[in-house]
Image (spheres, coloured by chain):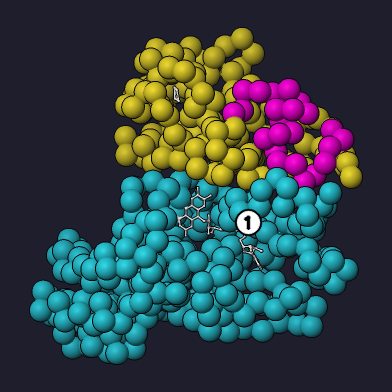
């Protein structure tokens, strides 16, 4: 029982014919081939599937495809500005906040969501913002450092890297 | 394959439910979609309430605040009215999951799930919240304490939707404390939680107090005897020790993967003892 679903994906309107009962993460990864968004747990516990829905961080494993209708969705593929990395991405590289990389898309989305709402977060607020994102590799400190650095860069007006 | 409806009005919701009584409602999906595997998701239709008019947002009328059932925990935390009038509710929902879960999960979903561990519930009991229920037949209101009757059990009838929560604006409390004990800080389902609010006089004695505990009984634990016990007493070690004993006697916790019955009983009492420090911190 497919249905047409139209939404803004990473800045461009897309229309797809899909089963509205699918999970948003499956539509993004399988129907649209955007495999940057990861599925870790499928239960809301790990944050790997985070995307921005109207600038708010949500979990695409707990969303149905139907709920994409009319929304502005940003996945990790839409975070960089053309060829220029987003300051959060740049800082993740500089601070060694990426090891295996599985958690990185979700971490970056969580960080961008935080910095959009709160450009000058405290370290505690950064920790809280990534509190639902599990990383098995880094021990989190470098990720928190990177987000703090990105906040600084963005406040100082760097558009990117 | 199941359908997913995205209705814009309650009338449409009622039409769908009368046509397909087995269709399941959801708001944020952070309880329902977790529990339904991919297979189960396709068994019957789903009705998503997120875009239904009148179910979201916070408004004020007649000395009371109306919180739409589909208001997310994140929206509640950002709402100035809640921070100003019901800081204990803000504090409670701040302890739910992590930001993304709070951006999806709703107060209505927390209430309808009726888990003994639902973090908004003790605060809503302390604030004497009422629920507003709508169906094709009309609407009714009842106290939250009557709406929830046990774990996962509510007075919601087939075809009925929780539309909003009402809380009186003037609570008259000048001290409040919420505390949750979990296995870790982020994302932890509570082992025990407590919401406490009181009106203290100039000397620090309780004029009126309300106390509610989560995860230590099949539904939120409240006790008129406990609330009355505080009256006229300061929140010192002696008062709290006696209150803790009342709580340990009164609660009926379960043992599960997160904690044993005995541990929960002990923690429930210990939460009361924390009020002395909380009181000292704001003095
Ligand atoms: C990773 C994770 C961590 C969590 N941590 C916590 C936590 O710390 N504390 C806590 O309390 N909870 C926690 N939860 C549970 C959940 O997020 C909350 O209970 C949330 O408030 C549920 O709201 P929802 O809108 O997502 O519910 P949904 O899943 O949409 O719905 C839940 C139930 O309520 C019914 N329902 C929802 N809205 C209505 C309505 N308006 N009218 C009638 N019926 C309705 C649905 O039919 C369903 O049965 C967590 C969940 C996840 C996935
Ligand atoms: S895959 Fe969505 S939170 Fe883990
Ligand atoms: S870098 Fe490997 S999970 Fe975070």
In-front residue for pair A29/B175: A29
Chain drawn cyan in the picture: B
Percent coordinates x, y for residue B250 in the rendering: 30, 82
Residue B192 drawn above or below residue A21: below
**Residue A106 shown in magenta:** no
**How crowded is the residue under tag 1: few (<14 C-alpha within 10 Å), some, or many (20+)?**
some
**Is any atom of residue B283 visible in this view?**
no
Percent coordinates x, y for residue A4 in the rendering: 87, 39
Residue B108 drawn above or below residue B153: above
In-front residue for pair B15/A156: B15
Report whether the residue tagged 1 is closer than 8 Å to ligand 1: yes
> What count of labels does the image hold?
1
On the picture, is B229 further left or further right than B131?
Answer: left
The boundaries of the magenta stretch are: A16-38
Residue B74 drawn above or below residue A31: below
Q: Which residue is mark 1?
A: B32
On the picture, is B246 further left or further right than B261?
Answer: left
Percent coordinates x, y for residue B274 in the rendering: 20, 65
Chain drawn yellow in the picture: A
């Amino acid at each position: 029982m497919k249905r047409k679903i139209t939404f803004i994906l990473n800045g461009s309107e897309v229309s797809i014919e899909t089963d509205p009962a699918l999970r948003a993460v499956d539509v993004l990864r399988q129907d649209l081939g955007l495999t940057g968004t990861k599925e870790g747990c499928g239960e809301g516990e790990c944050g790997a599937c985070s995307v921005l829905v109207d600038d708010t961080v949500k979990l695409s494993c707990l969303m149905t495809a139907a709920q994409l209708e009319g929304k502005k969705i940003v996945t990790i593929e839409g975070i960089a500005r053309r060829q220029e990395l987003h300051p959060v991405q740049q800082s993740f590289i500089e601070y060694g906040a990426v090891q295996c990389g599985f958690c990185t898309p979700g971490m970056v989305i969580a960080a961008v969501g935080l910095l959009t709402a709160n450009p000058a977060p405290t370290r505690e607020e950064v920790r809280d913002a990534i509190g639902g994102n599990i990383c098995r590799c880094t021990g989190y400190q470098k990720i928190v450092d990177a987000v703090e650095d990105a906040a600084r860069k963005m406040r100082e007006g760097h558009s990117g890297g | 394959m199941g359908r997913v409806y995205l209705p814009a009005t309650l009338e449409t919701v009622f039409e769908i439910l009368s046509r397909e009584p087995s269709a399941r409602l959801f708001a944020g999906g952070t309880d329902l979609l977790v529990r339904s595997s991919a297979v189960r998701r396709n068994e019957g239709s789903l009705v998503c309430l997120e875009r239904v008019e009148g179910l979201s947002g916070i408004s004020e009328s007649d000395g009371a605040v109306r919180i739409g059932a589909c208001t997310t925990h994140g929206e509640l935390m950002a709402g100035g009215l809640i921070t100003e009038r019901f800081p204990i509710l803000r504090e409670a929902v701040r302890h739910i999951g992590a930001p993304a879960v709070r951006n999806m999960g709703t107060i209505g979903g927390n209430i309808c799930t009726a888990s003994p561990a639902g973090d908004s519930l003790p605060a809503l009991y302390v604030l004497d919240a009422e629920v507003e229920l709508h169906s094709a037949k009309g609407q009714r209101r009842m106290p939250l304490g009557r709406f929830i009757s046990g774990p996962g059990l509510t007075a919601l009838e087939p075809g009925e939707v929780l539309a909003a929560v009402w809380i009186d604006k003037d609570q008259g409390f000048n001290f409040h404390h919420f505390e949750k004990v979990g296995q870790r800080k982020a994302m932890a389902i509570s082992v025990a939680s407590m919401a406490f609010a009181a009106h203290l006089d100039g000397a620090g004695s309780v004029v009126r107090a309300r106390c509610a505990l989560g995860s230590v009984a099949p539904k939120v634990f409240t006790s008129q005897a406990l609330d009355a016990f505080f009256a006229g007493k300061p929140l010192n070690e002696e008062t709290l020790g006696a209150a803790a004993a009342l709580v340990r006697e009164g609660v009926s916790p379960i043992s599960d993967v997160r904690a044993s019955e005995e541990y929960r009983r002990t923690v429930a009492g210990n939460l009361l003892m924390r009020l002395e420090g909380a009181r000292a911190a704001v003095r």
